Amino acid sequence: MASSDHLLTANQVNANLSYLRMKRLIDIFGSIIGLIFLLPIFFVVAILIKIEDPKGPVFFKQVRIGKDETEFQMYKFRSMVSDAEERLKELLELNEVSGAMFKMKNDPRITKIGKFIRRTSIDELPQLWNVLKGDMSLVGPRPPLKREVEQYTEYDSQRLFVTPGCTGLWQVSGRSNLGFDEMVDLDIRYIKIRSIKYDFIIIYKTIRVLLGSKDAY
């Protein structure tokens, strides 16, 4: 972990305005194209979710923390039972990753269709709407929960200097097999060297592992 003498500042991170403008244009174009072409998948997944659990909603929305600690509603396809958040307290002691994050490989709250859409990352596709709105980017750090941010150190908080992403260096470097500290280190490494070329490399790697990823749960 870096010392406080080497911490980034928000001004340093966001100094390259030409990169940020181009990144936003790519986000808008990419999210629109993605939403249009993936619409048939949206319909099929929605039907399957409703067949398994007719009373529950198709989409799951949750408050996440974005750039500069701004709160926003992040959207996903619902992959868990309707009362998943209420049941989380019973499972916290079974957390399988370290730090300010909860992950459990055989989480009993996940539905049958939920296991499939999580394994293929299809559950993440509605986040393209967040990208179009500007809450998220195609590439960036995973948007954390408020309870996670409350446990952040000053070092961890550097993740919040940039717009969170649908995919990032963490997701293509091991994802759920990595601990919280490793995730933060990867995110900060990305923030330091990010560029349009690097973003496209991460998007390409994401597409390669999108179907059949063994690291998603």
Image (cartoon, rainbow, N blue to C red):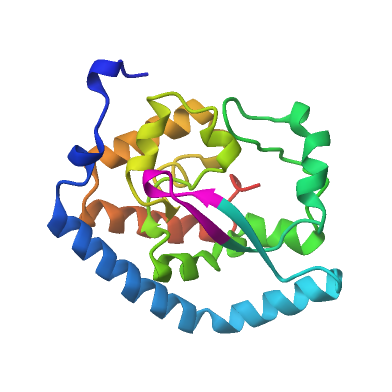
In this orientation, which residue lies closer to the viewer: 65 or 41? 65
Against 195, residue 24 (above or below) is below
Q: How many labels does the image show?
A: 0
Place of residue 176 in the rendered image (x, y in percent of width and height, measured from the top left):
58, 39
In this orientation, which residue lies closer to the viewer: 138 or 106? 138
Side of 5 relative to 128 (left or right):
left
Query: Going 83% across and 45% down the picture, which residue do you hit?
Result: 108
In this orientation, which residue lies closer to the viewer: 27 or 106? 27
Query: Going 17% across and 56% down the picture, which residue do you hit?
Result: 19
Q: Is residue 159 magenta?
A: no
Quick one: quadrant of the N terminus? top left
Quarter holding residue 80: bottom right
Against 98, residue 102 (above or below) is below
Q: Does the magenta stretch include residue 66?
A: yes
Place of residue 153 in the rendered image (x, y in percent of width and height, measured from the top left):
44, 23
Query: Going 20% across and 63% down the picture, which residue do you hit?
Result: 21
Residue bounds of the magenta highlight: 64-74
Place of residue 63 in the rendered image (x, y in percent of width and height, measured from the top left):
58, 53
Quarter holding residue 170: top left
In this orientation, which residue lies closer to the viewer: 30 or 156? 156
Against 23, residue 29 (above or below) is below
Side of 116 relative to 172 (left or right):
right
Quarter holding residue 208: bottom left
Place of residue 15 in the rendered image (x, y in percent of width and height, measured from the top left):
15, 46
